[in-house]
Image (cartoon, grey):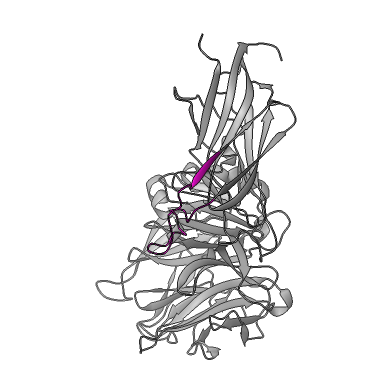
Amino acid sequence: MPSKRRTLKHQFGGGWATDFGLSADVTPSGSGDVTVPFLVEAENVYYELDGGPRKIGGASKLNGTVVNAGNEIRGLFDFWRQGTAFAPTQKRVIYSGTAIYADAADGTFVSIQTGLVDDKAPCFTVFNDNLILSNDSAVDVPMTYDQTAVTNLGGTPPLFSFSCVHKNRVFAAGVATLPSRLYYSKTLDAANWTDATSGSIDIDPNDGDRITAIASYKNDLWVFKGPYRGSIHRITGSANTGSDSFQRITFIVGLGAVSHNTLFRFRDDLGFMWSDGTIHSLQATAAYGDFNEAALSRPIHSYIKANLNYTFISRAWAATDPSRSLVAFTIPIGTSQYCNQVLMLDYSRQDVRWASWPALNANCVARVYDSLSPILMIGGRDGFVRKTNISNKSIDTSTAYQAKVTLPFTDYGSGLVMKTLTAASLKLGSAGVSSSILNWVRDTQAQQSQTFSATVGGGALLDSTFILGTSALQGAAFQDVFKPIEDGGEFRSIQFQVVNAGLNEDMSLRALGATIEVGAESLEA
């Protein structure tokens, strides 16, 4: 007589996707494999190359002493000055309150400029080995920093909010009195805005929008307008006169960028956040227009709409970590006036995956070199800059945080058939002790739980922490931990959740097993 008991192996075929609902139609294969198409929750995790969610690294303070009496860090930038002797020097620059601070790559921040307007969005642009500093106050003049002193930019620059470098010029916009005007400097001279080779271009003035972001990409300058009607424009050419003179081409109307600091590069593309919180890319927009279904953020639009504080969305930031193929976004949610949530976009696959990182106290984010290794650093709302992705799974060495993965409900192909959960397993990886909790909900019943503890020892996993020639390859890299579930109970549909909240505990979830005993069909409620 054939057995009615089957062991099903759940593997992860998608990321966090609130817009897909709470249930998924999945039917086990003949061998019992179940591909989970999306996750209802993915909290404080990223995705390894096999799709399995893993607990994010911890965060530790860069500065031992609080900056600016604990006020929020509004912007962070890694400023390298090359010099002329093959001896580059590093300064990490932050905006906080009414001042600008810098360290000498040592975590000790000192004030380099005071007297600014409080609570404004900064911009950082490196040009001619100097750092151009500006913000959206409409009062503070653009400045330049040579790692020794901050001075006014010089010449007669426009009172711009943000800038970028394109074809050996500084392009700038965000002037309050002329919100649709794009300015450009003389070639190789950031202080000269009156030369015959400098000038300006008006981008659809009086259309109800203003220029909100600019970027150099694919040999053209891209100009974004918003925050209402939205439009994107291309500036081709290299000069203001002659056969290669600047020309404006409207790329699309109906979509733009919310701010300069939400532009990001990934793959061979340029991404941007729009004023409704949705996240797009130029290549997808070129292929599909402003069609909402083509947005990178499409799987989580319901979360964005329900939680984003649109009043302060212009304070959002984005930063790319190419080594891990991910982009981190800081956004304000709920009633917060400052960014208090991190969204993570994983672009290592053709279909992007999302997760949320609430464990990080992040108001802004930037890619910064730390001991010649590029990592993401975050500026907090407490006067501290923090390194992320540290090996200890803690915040500031002492605070634990929770990794949580919630699968959708599934009836394994038939809601008519009653089923009973009799055993479960978690395939866990990563060195050290991992004590994870498996929760499950049967239909409308109360949640049930089982703890799974594993000690994976030996050496290092063959992952981003493995160092060739130094690390020893771990023999027991993954461990299947099995548990009988005596009170698993009957169900038509079931939802699983895995949680790890242990201090300095890792969780690398490669698969979830469930032994199901198939019963009879039933029409009873």
Residue found farthest to the left: 243
Residue 111 point in image, percent of width and height: 63, 86
Residue found farthest to the top: 1
**Main secondary-structure element of the magenta-colored stretch:** loop
> How many labels, in total?
0
Q: Nearer the viewer, residue 510 or 333?
A: 510
Whether 392 is drawn above or below 412: the answer is below
Q: Nearer the viewer, residue 447 or 72?
A: 447
Whether 26 is drawn above or below 91: the answer is above
Indicate whether residue 342 is drawn in magenta: no
Answer whether residue 446 is visible to the viewer in this image.
Answer: yes
Residue 223 point in image, percent of width and height: 44, 64
- The magenta segment is 457-480
Residue 117 point in image, percent of width and height: 67, 79
Which residue is rendered at x = 66% and y = 58% of the image? 332
- Residue 448 shown left or right of residue 233 in the figure: right
Occupied quadrant, residue 361: bottom right
Q: Nearer the viewer, residue 211 or 441?
A: 441
Which residue is rendered at x = 69% and y = 23% of the image? 489
Which residue is rendered at x = 41% and y = 81% of the image? 185
The quarter of the picture where the C terminus appears is top right
Occupied quadrant, residue 302: top right
Whether 78 is drawn above or below 459: the answer is below
Residue 458 point in image, percent of width and height: 49, 53
Indicate whether residue 463 is drawn in magenta: yes
Answer whether residue 122 is visible to the viewer in this image.
Answer: no
Whether 107 is drawn above or below 206: the answer is below
